[in-house]
Image (cartoon, helix red, strand yellow):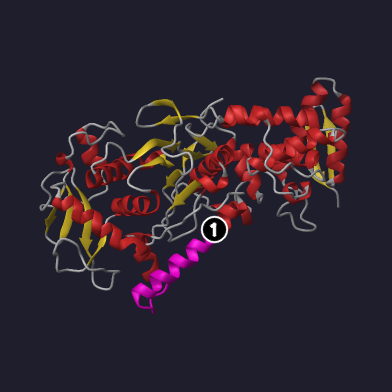
Amino acid sequence: MELRLYDTLAREKRPFRPLDPARVRMYVCGPTVYDFAHIGNARPVIVFDVLFRLLRHLYGAAHVTYVRNITDVDDKINARAAEEYPALPLNEAIRTVTEKTEQQFHADVDALGCLRPTIEPRATEHIEEMRVLIERLVAAGNAYVAEAHVLFSVPSMPDYGRLSRRPLDEMIAGARVDVAPYKRDPTDFVLWKPSKPGEPAWPSPSGIATPGRPGWHIECSAMSWQHLGETFDIHGGGIDLVFPHHENEIAQSRCAFRTPVMANYWMHNGFLQVEGEKMSKSLGNFFTIRELLNTTNFGSNKWHGRVLRLAMLMTQYRQPIDWTVDRLVEARKTLREWIDAVEGFEAESGALPSELLDVLSDDLNLPGALGVLHSLYRAARHRTDAVACRRFGSALAFLGLWGGEMSNDVFGYGVEVGEGPAPADIEALIADRNLARKEKNFHEADRIRDELAAMGVVLKDSKNGTTWEIAR
């Protein structure tokens, strides 16, 4: 099956035809490094990691370049640096915050089983490229200088808005720019702005005497151009970036280089909500990756990174995802069974079952891929067929769901000695046992009871249901 990808710009799946099969190029918007990444940030990291793996398999690892940027100049970074390191000069404090946060981000996404991108450029290391792009836009009449700012003139681009297809009033309401009297049009957005005293500052473009710093959107245009060229294959990110960020990237890059497109394929993952509600600190349902890995404030449990990854892959990437404790419990139970089947069997390096390749080639059909994994598991679960076990292990390794860990590394992750198993896992096993009893599958019901007993869980069956307690 040929690779087909859903293109947000075209609003349809399209056969993937790289500009140069010997140099497949993908850019994905990365983190703004001022705090721990939240679980919503993990979704594009995992989704585009799967695509990166698939492209490497199809075209060869040496022929795929994946760029994911790091934004290290931003108002939120400035505020966090001043708050955490008030005794340091602001620029020094900013560097401390961004370097620390970048390390935290890498540690967290490594735990999710993600490969590192080919290149991770920092915005502050590409200021000169941003200045060059801004100068080109001003010279071409697509940008103008006003009160030490440089702004992109949206009306100068007749087909602005094709990606988001938003009406003008929504564009004005949703644009990430300040309402300012010096703007020629309400939709115009900032390419460069003057720096406040003490803030990071660089010589400004277009003859502006006041030192300044770049706007948000120009950063990605400059970094993608520097590392992938004027036009490249795939640009990805979360659906929340379609407007205004990606729309403005397209405007900047196309007008600067006079090209019909910036990227040939635009891919976006869906939103994430928590237990049916939008994730928000005010609602108390805001969770970072680090919290889920290391603390017990979500489902009274700590979760292994590969469990988080599997839970994320259980929904098609373009659809919204509801992040629930039940989802994680199901993912952990499933992954434990899968790893039980393959541990001790070495995965076939570079091998990939054709049926898995087929479903992934259909716009990263992740639920279909998990269906293939369930089928491979059924062939491997008894551990008597070494070939089946190695095939299954290869599939798990390809999707980043297994790196050679033993089952207990995942199932027992984070449970302290004497603490006992997590309540969420116990309840899930009891539910499975009750279902087995209802279906008169008493062999399976007894097996689950024995498994719970081995975990130190004592069951009490009555006419009112099953209760449990930890043996003391």
Residue in the foreground of this view, choosing between 450 and 99: 99
Question: Considering the image in quadrants, where does the N terminus appear?
Answer: top right
Asked if 219 appears above or below 299 in the picture, the reply is below
Residue 168 location, quadrant: top left
Count of numbered marks? 1
- Residue at coordinates 27% horizontally, 69% vertically from top-left? 201
Q: Which residues are magenta?
A: 84-106
Asked if 275 appears above or below 207 in the picture, the reply is above
Amino acid type at mark 1? His
Picture coordinates of residue 4, whole percent (x, y): 49, 28
Picture coordinates of residue 323, whole percent (x, y): 55, 39
Residue in the foreground of this view, choosing between 283 and 71: 71
* Residue indicated by mark 1: 106
- Residue at coordinates 50% horizontally, 45% vertically from top-left? 64
- Residue at coordinates 61% horizontally, 31% vertically from top-left? 357
Residue 342 location, quadrant: top right
Picture coordinates of residue 143, whole percent (x, y): 16, 50
Residue in the foreground of this view, choosing between 299 and 42: 42
Residue located farthest toward the bottom when viewing the structure as drawn: 87
Picture coordinates of residue 453, whole percent (x, y): 87, 42
Circle 1: element type: helix
Q: Is residue 125 magenta?
A: no
Is residue 427 something that shows in the picture?
Answer: no
Asked if 197 appears above or below 67 in the picture, the reply is below
Q: Residues within 10 Å of mark 1 (few under 14, many from 20)?
A: some
- Tell me which secondary structure the magenta stretch mostly adopts: helix
Q: Is residue 94 magenta?
A: yes
Is residue 382 something that shows in the picture?
Answer: yes
Left/right placement of residue 329 relative to residue 151 reads right
